[in-house]
Image (cartoon, rainbow, N blue to C red):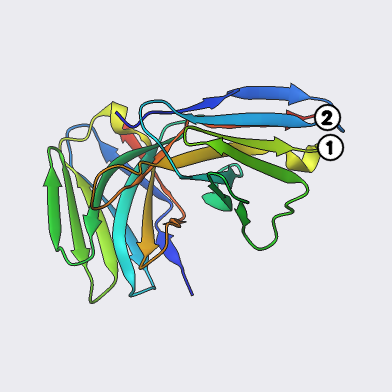
Amino acid sequence: GAVVSQHPSWVICKSGTSVKIECRSLDFQATTMFWYRQFPKQSLMLMATSNEGSKATYEQGVEKDKFLINHASLTLSTLTVTSAHPEDSSFYICSARDVRGRGVQPQHFGDGTRLSIL
Amino acid sequence: GEDVEQSLFLSVREGDSSVINCTYTDSSSTYLYWYKQEPGAGLQLLTYIFSNMDMKQDQRLTVLLNKKDKHLSLRIADTQTGDSAIYFCAETMYNTDKLIFGTGTRLQVFP
């Protein structure tokens, strides 16, 4: 259980293109999903917290107009990198928390999306 | 502030035990986690421990928590080549969903 699917796994596109990444919880519902960015050989940096039916909460220094987040249902959140440039190239990972049950509800992660902007 | 530190690299022989260490600074941590990341992949939750516990064992994995010293460790018994990966510890604080990740430890297992 607790499977998170992220799509696409790898995308290469030209500078100036907008890219949409999807994050789906396959067998559970998630009111909260998280988007992270990971640079090579580094840890994960939280970009934003995505809340179903409301606006995302962005971390300090993350441009909300650059990284658009939509969480329209309990099983889907999307991250759109608008007008992407080479410096946006990175590994983007999403996670989701299961809202069911009681006690600790750890975050379950997708397999990540490698974004390469030429 | 929040700061989670790990040693960068650990190399062990197949069959030996591995111990990965983590230190954190925020005493209000509620849960502490260990995640595994294989190359080019997302994170796999291995285990977690509540902050009022000292130890948790799950098959080959043993988590030890020293709350006084703010030190967390993950012991992998009978380490296999398939255990080679990057291991991240992470914490959440009271009344928040956010995970604060450590710097990650690259574990290399050689035959």
Q: Which numbered disc, 1 or 2, marks the residue that appears first in the sequence?
A: 2
On screen, residue B13 above or below B68: above
User: What distance separates the C-alpha of mark 1 from that of mark 2?
Assistant: 5 Å
Residue A50 place in picture, x, y as percent: 56, 47
Q: Chain of mark 2?
A: A
Residue hosting label 2: A17
Same chain check for tags 1 and 2: yes
Image position of B102 (left or right of A99):
right
Circle 2 SS class: loop
| Residue that appears at 19% across and 53% down | B63
Q: Amino acid at mark 2?
A: Thr
Q: Nearer the viewer, residue A99 or A5?
A: A99
| Residue that appears at 57% across and 24% down | A7
Q: Residue furthest right?
A: A16
On screen, residue B111 above or below B9: above
Residue A83, labelled with which disc? 1
Image position of A60 (left or right of B70):
right
Q: Amino acid at mark 1?
A: Ser
Residue B26 place in picture, x, y as percent: 38, 73
